[in-house]
Amino acid sequence: DGGITQSPKYLFRKEGQNVTLSCEQNLNHDAMYWYRQDPGQGLRLIYYSQIVNDFQKGDIAEGYSVSREKKESFPLTVTSAQKNPTAFYLCASSDRAGNTIYFGEGSWLTVV
Amino acid sequence: GESVGLHLPTLSVQEGDNSIINCAYSNSASDYFIWYKQESGKGPQFIIDIRSNMDKRQGQRVTVLLNKTVKHLSLQIAATQPGDSAVYFCAENWGGGSQGNLIFGKGTKLSVKP
């Protein structure tokens, strides 16, 4: 099946720990994105990548890092510098930036 | 979309009725708009899109209307079903931003009563 796969679905992080969320797509899309969603809020862009080996900060990049070594993969690391990381994280892709974005099923991150 | 803090606007409709969900977009230069449906705990799903050279576009049971004069977008769902219960939000692309990406509204929660 074509689509975007995020893992894990649920993740618990201890304070001071870095965690990495995986995102893989087999849609042959050039652009990939990470969004954060808090309860009752809209989507906020963390990072995006328009092409392999290139990525740009979004509106709330502080405390996060990404890599784009392969077209299919865009992992997001939530670092200990992110003071309020508990949220629902959504990975997405599009054939190119600005076109329709398709989303994965999301990952829930909770700090314990 | 409108900012309402932690509480989303809610639309409650009877099963079988038509639903109209509204969205006010922010930039008059936006030229592409999308509606998404998000069920609880899941990722958003694409429903329908429209470009700024159109006023109306129809899909299966859904219609999107675009009024550029007042920067307003609406999603009409015909014969609403319990499976339509979800949060619906619009997105706009004005292409001229530093990122050229979509800007998302906060959403409206649709609740369908059987």
Image: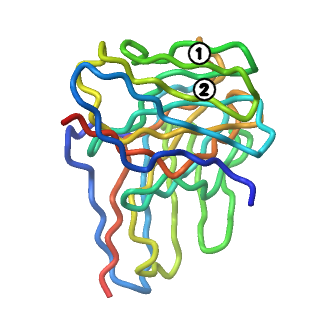
Name the spot of residue B101 as percent of width and height, x first. 60, 26
**At 51% across and 47% down in the image, what residue appears?**
B73
Q: Residues within 10 Å of mark 1 (few under 14, many from 20)?
A: few
Q: Residues within 10 Å of mark 2 (few under 14, many from 20)?
A: many
On screen, residue B79 versus residue B113, left or right, reads right
- Against A112, residue B41 (above or below) is below
Mark 1, secondary structure of its residue: loop
Identify the residue position indicated by label 2 in the image.
B101
Name the spot of residue B32 as percent of width and height, x first. 66, 37
**At 68% across and 66% down in the image, what residue appears?**
B59
Quadrant for the N terminus of chain B, please. Answer: top left
Q: Tell me the quarter of the picture where residue B113 sits.
A: bottom left
Q: Foreground: A69 or B27? A: A69
Cα distance between the residues tagged 2 and 1: 7 Å
Identify the residue position indicated by label 1 in the image.
B97
CB atoms at circles 2 and 1 under 8 Å apart?
yes
Name the spot of residue A66 as percent of width and height, x first. 54, 19
Q: Tell me the quarter of the picture where residue A100 sits.
A: top right
Q: What amino acid type is highlighted by mark number 1? A: Gly
- Against A23, residue A51 (above or below) is above
Marks 2 & 1 on one chain: yes
Name the mark nearer the viewer: 2 or 1.
2
Residue B83 visible (yes or no): yes
Disc on res. B72: none
Mark 2, secondary structure of its residue: loop
On screen, residue B80 versus residue B61, left or right, reads left
Disc 1 chain ID:
B
**At 37% across and 38% down in the image, what residue appears?**
A37
Quadrant for the C terminus of chain B, please. Answer: bottom left
Q: What amino acid type is highlighted by mark number 2? A: Asn
